[in-house]
Amino acid sequence: MNKPSDSLATRWQSLRDEVAEVALRCGRAPEEICIIGVTKYVDAETTRELVLAGAHDLGESRPQTLWDKAVALANLPCRWHLIGPLQRNKVRKTLPQVHVIHSIDSLKLANFIENVAAELGLLVQGLIEVNISGDASKQGVPPDQFEELLGQLEPLKNLRICGLMGMSGLGDGAKEVSGQFEQLRILRDKAIANGTAGSLTLKELSMGMSDDFPLAIAQGATMIRVGSRLFP
Ligand SMILES: *Cc1c(COP(=O)(O)O)cnc(C)c1O
């Protein structure tokens, strides 16, 4: 674990080591898991330090902050993940900067992104966010509506759905959290088995944060989103 005196580079390396260790323990290859450094707690300067330490996937929950940092760090080898809600009036400025949008949760938003992406000549990757914890405060489509939404998004051309995103419930115990992550994976597997996924492989499962990424890796996470562990 971290000591307060550790440098950011040391904390990043220790996170990478732990992810690799957990992956191997679960019989998975460490390279299957993309670590997204969530930089919403820090400014562009500290974000730059993280990239220089070796983090190439960065996450922000607010579109405006993502734009600002993408511009500030434009010369660095990093790609941006939007992990928070996207309002329609922010789509046009976000699309050229973003690698994956993790928060697609309605047909309306998806159609809007599809149209703007077509206009800009972009192919955008998105994840369907599912409310696996059932917390009323959480974003995401309810699990029982996931497959219907997926069926509606499958034909889109400029927005390509590449997987699912979920967040565990605040204060839930390990067993419950593990069950929530398992549910996300099962939703994916069922959609593929039922044919609802069509041509989509739904390879990505974005789940797990500082407190629960080992449980998420055990349940098949391909992207983990880690912030406070890097910026204590
Ligand atoms: C803030 C945030 C994270 C990172 O959480 P930590 O507990 O700080 O690691 C991950 N995902 C989303 C959607 C977030 O908003």
Image (spheres, helix red, strand yellow):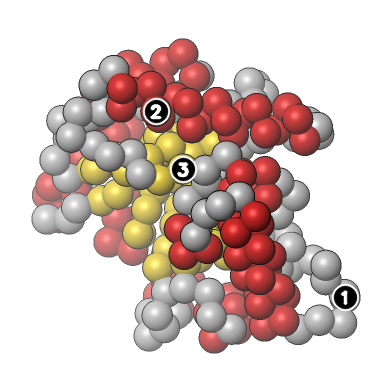
Question: Who's the residue at 52% across and 54% down the image?
Answer: 28
Which residue position holds label 3? 205
Left of 202 or right of it: where is 208? right
Helix or strand or loop: what does disc 3 sit on? strand
Task: Mark 2: give few (<14), some (14-19) or many (20+) Cα within 10 Å.
Answer: some
In the rendered structure, the answer to whether residue 126 lies left or right of residue 55 reads: left
Q: Nearer the viewer, residue 56 or 70?
A: 56
Mark closer to the observer (2, 3): 2
Q: Amino acid at mark 2?
A: Asp
Residue 71 higher or lower than 181, as above or below: below
Question: Are the residues flagged by discs 3 and 1 in contact, CB closer than 8 Å?
Answer: no
Q: Amino acid at mark 1?
A: Pro
Viewer can see residue 181: yes
Q: Within 8 Å: ligand 1 and the Cβ of disc 1? A: no
Q: Find residue 228 and name its label.
A: none
Q: Earlier in the sequence, mark 2 or mark 3?
A: 2
**Marks 2 and 1, how far apart at CA:** 41 Å
